[in-house]
Amino acid sequence: MSEKILVIGESRDGVLRNVTFEAIGAAKKINSNAEVIGVLCGTDDLNSQAQEMIYYGADRVVTVSNEKLATYTSDGYGQAVLAVVEDENPDAIVMGHTAIGKDLTPKLASKLESGLISDAVDINLVGDQVVFTRPIYSGKAFENKIITEGLLFATIRPNNIPALDRDDSRSGEVQEKTVDISDLRTVIKEVLRKASEGVDLSEAKVVVAGGRGVKSADGFKPLYELADVLGGAVGASRGACDADYCDYSLQIGQTGKVVTPDLYIAVGISGAIQHLAGMSNSKVIVAINKDPEANIFNVADYGIVGDLFEVIPILIEEVKNLKVNA
Protein backbone atom coordinates (compact mmCIF):
# COMPACT_ATOMS: atom_id res chain seq x y z
CA MET A 1 0.00 0.00 0.00
CA SER A 2 1.33 3.44 -0.93
CA GLU A 3 2.09 6.03 1.71
CA LYS A 4 -0.47 8.61 2.76
CA ILE A 5 0.34 12.22 3.61
CA LEU A 6 -2.28 14.47 5.19
CA VAL A 7 -2.16 18.18 4.39
CA ILE A 8 -4.20 20.30 6.79
CA GLY A 9 -5.65 23.19 4.83
CA GLU A 10 -6.23 26.66 6.22
CA SER A 11 -8.57 29.32 4.89
CA ARG A 12 -9.40 32.90 5.70
CA ASP A 13 -12.81 34.34 4.88
CA GLY A 14 -13.60 31.31 2.75
CA VAL A 15 -10.41 31.51 0.68
CA LEU A 16 -7.54 29.05 1.08
CA ARG A 17 -4.27 30.58 2.22
CA ASN A 18 -1.38 30.14 -0.18
CA VAL A 19 0.62 28.18 2.42
CA THR A 20 -1.94 25.38 2.01
CA PHE A 21 -0.76 24.88 -1.57
CA GLU A 22 2.86 25.13 -0.45
CA ALA A 23 2.14 22.39 2.10
CA ILE A 24 0.93 20.17 -0.74
CA GLY A 25 4.21 20.89 -2.54
CA ALA A 26 6.05 19.95 0.66
CA ALA A 27 4.14 16.68 0.83
CA LYS A 28 5.27 15.85 -2.70
CA LYS A 29 8.88 16.58 -1.68
CA ILE A 30 8.53 14.13 1.20
CA ASN A 31 7.30 11.40 -1.15
CA SER A 32 6.34 12.15 -4.73
CA ASN A 33 4.51 8.83 -5.01
CA ALA A 34 2.45 9.18 -1.84
CA GLU A 35 -1.29 9.79 -1.84
CA VAL A 36 -1.80 13.38 -0.70
CA ILE A 37 -5.01 13.82 1.25
CA GLY A 38 -6.25 17.31 2.07
CA VAL A 39 -8.17 18.04 5.27
CA LEU A 40 -10.54 21.00 5.53
CA CYS A 41 -12.58 22.07 8.54
CA GLY A 42 -15.28 24.72 8.75
CA THR A 43 -18.96 25.46 8.26
CA ASP A 44 -19.10 26.92 4.77
CA ASP A 45 -19.44 24.96 1.58
CA LEU A 46 -15.96 23.44 1.54
CA ASN A 47 -16.26 21.77 -1.88
CA SER A 48 -14.81 24.70 -3.82
CA GLN A 49 -11.83 24.89 -1.45
CA ALA A 50 -11.38 21.13 -1.71
CA GLN A 51 -11.32 21.39 -5.49
CA GLU A 52 -8.62 24.06 -5.27
CA MET A 53 -6.47 21.71 -3.21
CA ILE A 54 -6.93 19.04 -5.87
CA TYR A 55 -5.94 21.48 -8.63
CA TYR A 56 -2.73 22.15 -6.68
CA GLY A 57 -1.80 18.50 -6.26
CA ALA A 58 -3.99 16.83 -3.63
CA ASP A 59 -5.28 13.41 -4.70
CA ARG A 60 -8.42 13.61 -2.57
CA VAL A 61 -9.81 15.82 0.19
CA VAL A 62 -11.71 15.06 3.37
CA THR A 63 -14.00 17.85 4.59
CA VAL A 64 -15.39 18.18 8.11
CA SER A 65 -18.29 20.62 8.36
CA ASN A 66 -19.76 21.50 11.73
CA GLU A 67 -21.25 24.70 13.17
CA LYS A 68 -18.76 24.45 16.04
CA LEU A 69 -15.96 24.84 13.50
CA ALA A 70 -17.19 28.24 12.30
CA THR A 71 -14.26 29.91 14.08
CA TYR A 72 -10.97 28.20 14.84
CA THR A 73 -10.42 26.72 18.29
CA SER A 74 -7.73 24.17 19.04
CA ASP A 75 -10.34 21.97 20.75
CA GLY A 76 -12.75 21.90 17.83
CA TYR A 77 -10.23 21.62 15.02
CA GLY A 78 -8.18 19.16 17.06
CA GLN A 79 -11.15 16.80 17.39
CA ALA A 80 -11.98 17.10 13.70
CA VAL A 81 -8.45 16.49 12.43
CA LEU A 82 -7.80 13.64 14.88
CA ALA A 83 -10.91 11.87 13.61
CA VAL A 84 -9.54 12.07 10.06
CA VAL A 85 -6.11 10.89 11.22
CA GLU A 86 -7.69 7.85 12.90
CA ASP A 87 -9.54 6.97 9.68
CA GLU A 88 -6.64 7.50 7.31
CA ASN A 89 -3.67 6.37 9.46
CA PRO A 90 -1.26 8.59 7.50
CA ASP A 91 2.51 8.25 7.30
CA ALA A 92 3.02 12.03 7.44
CA ILE A 93 1.15 15.24 8.26
CA VAL A 94 2.05 18.70 6.92
CA MET A 95 0.61 22.11 7.75
CA GLY A 96 1.63 25.74 7.38
CA HIS A 97 3.62 27.37 10.19
CA THR A 98 0.97 30.03 10.72
CA ALA A 99 -0.68 31.30 13.90
CA ILE A 100 -3.21 28.47 13.64
CA GLY A 101 -0.59 25.91 12.64
CA LYS A 102 1.62 26.85 15.59
CA ASP A 103 -1.35 26.41 17.93
CA LEU A 104 -2.93 23.27 16.49
CA THR A 105 -0.01 21.03 15.58
CA PRO A 106 1.60 20.71 19.04
CA LYS A 107 -1.80 19.65 20.41
CA LEU A 108 -2.15 17.04 17.66
CA ALA A 109 1.42 15.80 18.16
CA SER A 110 0.77 15.38 21.88
CA LYS A 111 -2.42 13.42 21.26
CA LEU A 112 -0.71 11.25 18.63
CA GLU A 113 2.43 10.87 20.79
CA SER A 114 4.56 11.84 17.82
CA GLY A 115 7.44 14.19 17.17
CA LEU A 116 6.94 17.53 15.47
CA ILE A 117 9.38 19.52 13.35
CA SER A 118 8.21 23.11 13.23
CA ASP A 119 9.00 26.00 10.89
CA ALA A 120 10.72 23.99 8.16
CA VAL A 121 12.08 26.07 5.27
CA ASP A 122 13.29 23.19 3.11
CA ILE A 123 12.84 19.44 2.70
CA ASN A 124 15.35 17.10 1.08
CA LEU A 125 15.76 13.36 0.66
CA VAL A 126 19.09 11.93 1.78
CA GLY A 127 18.99 8.24 0.99
CA ASP A 128 15.82 6.99 2.63
CA GLN A 129 15.75 9.82 5.17
CA VAL A 130 13.52 12.88 4.90
CA VAL A 131 15.62 15.81 6.11
CA PHE A 132 13.90 19.01 7.27
CA THR A 133 15.86 22.27 7.42
CA ARG A 134 14.75 24.90 9.93
CA PRO A 135 16.25 28.17 11.19
CA ILE A 136 17.63 28.53 14.71
CA TYR A 137 19.11 31.38 16.77
CA SER A 138 16.74 33.93 15.23
CA GLY A 139 17.70 32.91 11.70
CA LYS A 140 21.47 33.18 12.20
CA ALA A 141 21.96 29.46 11.58
CA PHE A 142 20.09 26.44 10.25
CA GLU A 143 19.76 22.89 11.49
CA ASN A 144 18.80 19.68 9.73
CA LYS A 145 16.37 17.43 11.54
CA ILE A 146 14.94 13.99 10.90
CA ILE A 147 12.23 11.94 12.55
CA THR A 148 13.75 8.55 13.26
CA GLU A 149 10.60 6.68 14.21
CA GLY A 150 6.87 6.93 13.66
CA LEU A 151 4.81 9.65 12.05
CA LEU A 152 6.48 12.42 10.04
CA PHE A 153 4.87 15.62 11.29
CA ALA A 154 6.00 19.08 10.22
CA THR A 155 4.93 22.66 9.74
CA ILE A 156 6.42 24.74 6.92
CA ARG A 157 7.23 28.44 6.88
CA PRO A 158 5.22 30.37 4.25
CA ASN A 159 7.04 31.52 1.09
CA ASN A 160 9.86 28.97 1.30
CA ILE A 161 8.70 25.71 -0.27
CA PRO A 162 7.09 26.38 -3.66
CA ALA A 163 3.60 25.19 -4.48
CA LEU A 164 3.05 22.99 -7.51
CA ASP A 165 1.64 24.57 -10.65
CA ARG A 166 -2.15 24.77 -10.67
CA ASP A 167 -3.63 22.15 -12.99
CA ASP A 168 -7.34 22.60 -13.70
CA SER A 169 -7.47 19.20 -15.39
CA ARG A 170 -6.80 17.32 -12.16
CA SER A 171 -9.69 15.53 -10.49
CA GLY A 172 -10.06 13.79 -7.17
CA GLU A 173 -12.63 12.59 -4.69
CA VAL A 174 -14.06 14.94 -2.06
CA GLN A 175 -15.30 13.04 0.96
CA GLU A 176 -17.55 14.60 3.60
CA LYS A 177 -16.94 13.32 7.12
CA THR A 178 -19.23 13.89 10.08
CA VAL A 179 -17.50 14.43 13.40
CA ASP A 180 -19.27 15.02 16.71
CA ILE A 181 -17.51 18.04 18.19
CA SER A 182 -18.07 18.02 21.94
CA ASP A 183 -16.84 19.45 25.25
CA LEU A 184 -15.35 22.63 23.80
CA ARG A 185 -13.53 24.51 26.53
CA THR A 186 -13.23 27.65 24.42
CA VAL A 187 -16.11 29.59 22.89
CA ILE A 188 -15.35 32.42 20.46
CA LYS A 189 -17.88 35.22 20.92
CA GLU A 190 -16.41 37.78 18.55
CA VAL A 191 -13.39 38.22 16.30
CA LEU A 192 -11.90 41.70 15.99
CA ARG A 193 -9.58 42.04 13.03
CA LYS A 194 -6.83 44.61 13.34
CA ALA A 195 -4.65 43.38 10.49
CA SER A 196 -4.47 45.58 7.43
CA GLU A 197 -6.69 44.85 4.49
CA GLY A 198 -5.28 43.34 1.33
CA VAL A 199 -2.30 41.02 1.04
CA ASP A 200 -1.60 38.87 4.09
CA LEU A 201 1.67 40.03 5.65
CA SER A 202 3.02 36.56 6.45
CA GLU A 203 2.46 35.36 2.88
CA ALA A 204 3.24 38.54 0.93
CA LYS A 205 5.82 38.31 -1.84
CA VAL A 206 6.67 41.98 -1.30
CA VAL A 207 6.84 43.68 2.11
CA VAL A 208 7.37 47.39 2.69
CA ALA A 209 8.25 47.90 6.36
CA GLY A 210 8.56 51.15 8.26
CA GLY A 211 10.51 52.00 11.39
CA ARG A 212 10.88 54.94 13.74
CA GLY A 213 12.35 56.92 10.86
CA VAL A 214 8.85 57.16 9.37
CA LYS A 215 8.21 59.61 12.25
CA SER A 216 4.39 59.37 12.44
CA ALA A 217 1.27 57.47 11.48
CA ASP A 218 0.90 59.81 8.50
CA GLY A 219 4.44 58.86 7.51
CA PHE A 220 3.19 55.35 6.82
CA LYS A 221 0.82 56.54 4.09
CA PRO A 222 3.51 56.59 1.34
CA LEU A 223 4.54 53.07 2.44
CA TYR A 224 0.99 51.85 1.90
CA GLU A 225 0.99 53.46 -1.53
CA LEU A 226 4.30 51.83 -2.47
CA ALA A 227 3.09 48.46 -1.20
CA ASP A 228 -0.10 48.87 -3.20
CA VAL A 229 1.67 49.52 -6.51
CA LEU A 230 4.01 46.58 -5.85
CA GLY A 231 1.16 44.25 -4.87
CA GLY A 232 2.63 43.80 -1.41
CA ALA A 233 1.90 44.31 2.27
CA VAL A 234 3.04 46.81 4.88
CA GLY A 235 4.96 45.80 7.99
CA ALA A 236 6.72 47.62 10.79
CA SER A 237 9.49 47.44 13.34
CA ARG A 238 8.65 47.20 17.02
CA GLY A 239 9.89 50.74 17.45
CA ALA A 240 7.26 52.04 15.05
CA CYS A 241 4.56 50.02 16.82
CA ASP A 242 5.67 51.21 20.26
CA ALA A 243 5.50 54.80 19.01
CA ASP A 244 1.86 54.25 17.93
CA TYR A 245 2.65 54.85 14.28
CA CYS A 246 0.80 51.64 13.41
CA ASP A 247 -0.89 48.62 14.94
CA TYR A 248 1.10 45.78 16.54
CA SER A 249 -0.44 43.39 14.01
CA LEU A 250 2.15 44.76 11.55
CA GLN A 251 5.15 44.07 13.78
CA ILE A 252 7.96 42.07 12.21
CA GLY A 253 10.75 40.68 14.36
CA GLN A 254 11.66 38.32 17.14
CA THR A 255 8.48 39.13 19.08
CA GLY A 256 6.37 39.72 15.98
CA LYS A 257 5.84 38.03 12.64
CA VAL A 258 8.56 36.26 10.68
CA VAL A 259 8.42 37.00 6.95
CA THR A 260 10.40 35.69 3.99
CA PRO A 261 9.19 37.66 0.96
CA ASP A 262 10.88 37.84 -2.42
CA LEU A 263 11.43 41.57 -1.80
CA TYR A 264 11.72 43.32 1.57
CA ILE A 265 11.97 47.10 1.59
CA ALA A 266 13.09 48.44 4.98
CA VAL A 267 12.19 52.12 5.29
CA GLY A 268 13.60 54.15 8.17
CA ILE A 269 14.56 50.99 10.06
CA SER A 270 17.88 51.00 11.91
CA GLY A 271 18.31 47.21 11.85
CA ALA A 272 18.13 46.11 15.48
CA ILE A 273 18.93 42.43 15.89
CA GLN A 274 15.39 41.72 17.10
CA HIS A 275 13.98 43.08 13.84
CA LEU A 276 16.50 41.23 11.69
CA ALA A 277 15.32 37.97 13.27
CA GLY A 278 11.99 38.45 11.54
CA MET A 279 13.12 39.36 8.03
CA SER A 280 16.79 38.52 7.43
CA ASN A 281 15.91 35.46 5.32
CA SER A 282 14.06 37.57 2.74
CA LYS A 283 15.31 36.85 -0.77
CA VAL A 284 16.16 40.46 -1.66
CA ILE A 285 16.47 43.23 0.95
CA VAL A 286 16.42 46.92 0.06
CA ALA A 287 17.23 49.42 2.82
CA ILE A 288 16.30 53.12 2.75
CA ASN A 289 17.83 55.18 5.55
CA LYS A 290 19.44 58.58 5.84
CA ASP A 291 22.06 57.19 8.26
CA PRO A 292 24.80 55.49 6.20
CA GLU A 293 26.01 53.68 9.34
CA ALA A 294 22.64 52.06 10.07
CA ASN A 295 22.98 48.33 10.77
CA ILE A 296 20.25 47.48 8.26
CA PHE A 297 22.74 48.13 5.44
CA ASN A 298 24.84 45.20 6.69
CA VAL A 299 22.11 42.73 5.68
CA ALA A 300 20.72 44.64 2.68
CA ASP A 301 21.36 43.57 -0.89
CA TYR A 302 20.72 47.15 -2.05
CA GLY A 303 20.93 50.34 -0.02
CA ILE A 304 19.67 53.86 -0.59
CA VAL A 305 21.11 56.54 1.67
CA GLY A 306 18.61 59.36 1.68
CA ASP A 307 15.49 60.94 3.10
CA LEU A 308 12.72 58.37 2.83
CA PHE A 309 10.15 61.12 2.25
CA GLU A 310 12.02 62.04 -0.91
CA VAL A 311 12.97 58.52 -2.00
CA ILE A 312 9.59 56.77 -1.59
CA PRO A 313 7.60 59.12 -3.91
CA ILE A 314 10.27 58.67 -6.59
CA LEU A 315 10.07 54.89 -6.24
CA ILE A 316 6.29 54.99 -6.49
CA GLU A 317 6.41 57.00 -9.71
CA GLU A 318 9.10 54.77 -11.23
CA VAL A 319 7.12 51.61 -10.46
CA LYS A 320 3.98 53.17 -11.96
CA ASN A 321 5.92 54.13 -15.10
CA LEU A 322 7.32 50.61 -15.41
CA LYS A 323 3.80 49.19 -15.19
CA VAL A 324 2.50 51.57 -17.84
CA ASN A 325 5.32 50.74 -20.23
CA ALA A 326 5.30 47.00 -19.54
Image (cartoon, rainbow, N blue to C red):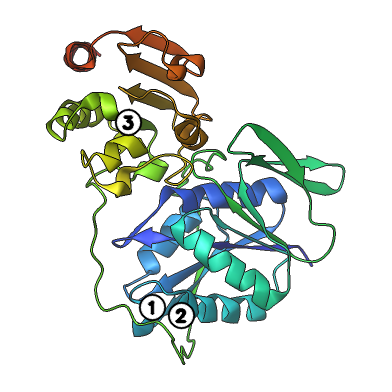
Q: Are marks 1 and 3 in contact (CB under 8 Å)?
A: no
Residue 237: percent from left, percent from top: 35, 35
Q: Nearer the viewer, mark 2 or mark 3?
A: 3
Q: Secondary structure at mark 2?
A: helix
Count neighbours of disc 1 (C-alpha within 10 A) and say few if under 14, some if 14 to 19, many if 20 or more: some
Q: Are marks 1 and 2 in contact (CB under 8 Å)?
A: yes
Residue 307, located in which quarter of the rendered image? top left
Name above or below for residue 132 compared with residue 64.
above
Along the horizontal axis of the image, is 13 left or right of 324?
A: right
Q: Answer left or right for 7 relative to 42.
A: right
Instruction: For the N terminus, give its image quadrant.
Output: bottom right
137 relative position to 125: left or right = left
Query: Residue 260, can we see it?
Result: no
Identify which residue is drawn at 18% across, 16% down. 309
Which comes sooner in the sequence, label 2 or label 3? 2
Count neighbours of disc 3 (C-alpha within 10 A) and say few if under 14, some if 14 to 19, many if 20 or more. many
The three-letter code of the residue at mark 1 reads: Leu
Q: Quick check: can you spot residue 137?
A: yes
| Label number found at residue 209 | 3
Find the distance from the CA under tag 1 to the CA under tag 2: 6 Å
Q: CA distance from mark 2 to mark 3?
A: 35 Å
Residue lying farthest right?
127
Instruction: Name the foreground residue: 76 vs 195.
Output: 195
| Rendering coords of residue 286 (x, y %) | 39, 18
User: Left or right of 63: which side holds 201?
Assistant: left
Q: Which residue is mark 2?
A: 76
- The mark found on residue 69 in the picture is 1
